Image: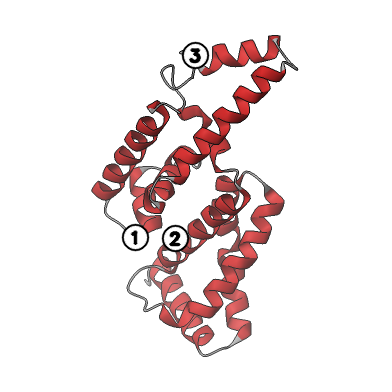
Amino acid sequence: MPDPVETNLEAERALIALAQTGNEEAFGRLMRDHYEPVFRLVASILRDEHAARDVCQEVWLTVWKNLATFRGEAKFSTWLHPIATRRAIDHLRSRKRWFNRFLPFRTDTDAEDGTSDRTAAAGEAAADGDPRQDLEKQEGNARFERAIDALPPKHRAVLALREIQHLSYDEIAENLGIARGTVMSRLFHARRQLAQKLGEPS
C-alpha cells in the first residue's frame, strides 16, 4: 500500500517542477497549499493581521522570483519558511517597532531606577500624564530599540521565533535550516548581548 505522505511529497515535487518552468497555475496551487502556514508564521511575528497579509504578498513574490533555486534537497516548507521569517523581520525593522516585541526581556536590573517592569508600569499608571515620566519612557524605548538593532540579524531571527512565536528549538532549526545546537548558541548570545546593551550606561 502506497505511503500517503510519500505520495503527497511526490505530487508536490511534480507541482514545484511545473511551477519552475513558469507555469502560473501550478504556482497558484503551490501558494494555496502553503499560504496559511506562511501567514500564521508571519502574523505570529508581526502581531498585525493586515501587515501580515502585505508581507505575505512580498514573500510569495520572492518565492516566485527565486523558485528556480529550490533544488528539492529539503522539504519545500523548510526552504519557504526562512524566506517568510526574513521578510517579517525586515518589516519590523523598517517600521521601527521591533523593541515593542521584546519588552518582556527587561529585568529588574534593566530599568533605569532599578525597579521591575511591573512596578514601573504601576507607577506610570499612577502618574499618567507626567511629562517627565513620558520623556523617560521615550528615552527607555529608544535605548531598547538601539539594543535590538545592535544584535546581528541571525540572532534577532532566533530571538523572534523563540520569544514571539514560541517555537521549540527543533522547530526553529527547521525554519532557519540550521542545527539545533546552533539555535541554542545563537539564542544564548542574543539574550546575553541584549542584557549587556541594556545594562550599559546611557
In terms of sequence position, does the residue under pointer 1 or pointer 3 come before the other?
3
Does the image show residue 128? yes
Residue drawn at (54%, 38%) of the image: 99
> What whole-number distance in Å separates the C-alpha atoms at marks 2 and 1?
8 Å
Which residue position holds label 3? 113
Residue that carries the numbered disc 1 in the rendered image: 177
Q: How many marks?
A: 3
Please tell me which residue is depicted at 33% across the width and 48% down the height of the picture.
170
Q: Is residue 146 above or below residue 82?
A: above
Residue 57 rendering spot, x and y as whole percentages: 64, 66
Residue at image position (49%, 56%) is 85
Give the residue at mark 2: 82
Farthest residue in the front direction?
A: 202
Q: Mark 1–mark 3 contact, CB under 8 Å? A: no
Q: Nearer the viewer, residue 62 or 155?
A: 155
Q: Which residue lies furthest to the right in this view?
A: 129
On the image, the x and y values in percent for residue 30 come to 56, 73
Callouts 2 and 1 close, C-beta under 8 Å = yes
Tell me, yes or no, if residue 40 can be seen here: no
Amino acid type of the residue tagged 3 in the rendering? Asp
The quarter of the rendered structure image containing the N terminus is bottom left
